[in-house]
Image (tube, helix red, strand yellow):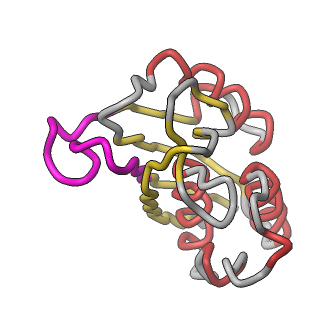
Amino acid sequence: MQRIGIGYDIHKLIEGRDLIIGGVKITHEKGLLGHSDADVLIHAIIDAMLGALALDDIGTLFPDTDPKYKDIDSTVLLKHVYNLIKSKGFKIINIDSNIIAQVPKMMPYIPKMKDILCRILNISHEDISIKAKTKEKLDAVGQKLAIEANAVVLLGK
């Protein structure tokens, strides 16, 4: 049996926060606003994993009203969801994802993101795609006000 899920996330860029994407701290003058570390890539992957099994979304599972999730490292949330997926008898077959940001450039950080995600999710580099896109200066992302990500995850039993 195979199940597929899609995930999406967007966060506003603000001063005074670290920029964390794919579990990697990225050099930039702004970071993403959120209750957790606001890692848009990991949040999109989490929602795709949960969606594949028709489970609650990330906001329901880890509500922003719960102080225990304040500034939490999203890799901790990802590990929890991965364990949930395994407990249902599923494994990750592959992940395809996009980070959409006008700035900063993501390409130099993608290999390290893949290393981190592969280690947590027990997959190989051939099983995950992380692509970097811009919005060609259109909308909030293109105006350097936000960063977004989307992901598709295929699970198998």
Residue closest to the eye, 78 or 137 = 137
The count of marks equals: 0
Left or right relative to 141: residue 7: right
Q: Residue furthest top?
A: 108
Give the quarter of the image for residue 2.
bottom right
Q: Position of residue 101 (x, y in %)?
A: 35, 38
The stretch of residues the image draws in magenta is 133-150
Q: Position of residue 135 (x, y in %)?
A: 21, 41
Q: Residue at x 29, y 34 (%)?
A: 102
Position of the C terminus by quadrant? bottom right
Q: Quadrant of residue 66?
A: bottom right
Q: Nearer the viewer, residue 17 or 56?
A: 17
Q: Is residue 117 magenta?
A: no
Where, quadrant-wise, is the N terminus in this rendering?
bottom right
- Height in image: 133 above or below 38? above
Q: Is residue 74 left or right of residue 94?
A: right
> Can residue 138 be found in the magenta stretch?
yes
Relative side of 40 to 20, left or right: left
Name the residue located 68 percent from the left edge and 29 percent from the top edge: 124
Image quadrant assignment for residue 152? bottom left
Which residue occupies 63% across, 39% down?
Answer: 18
Residue in view at x 82 percent, y 54 percent: 76
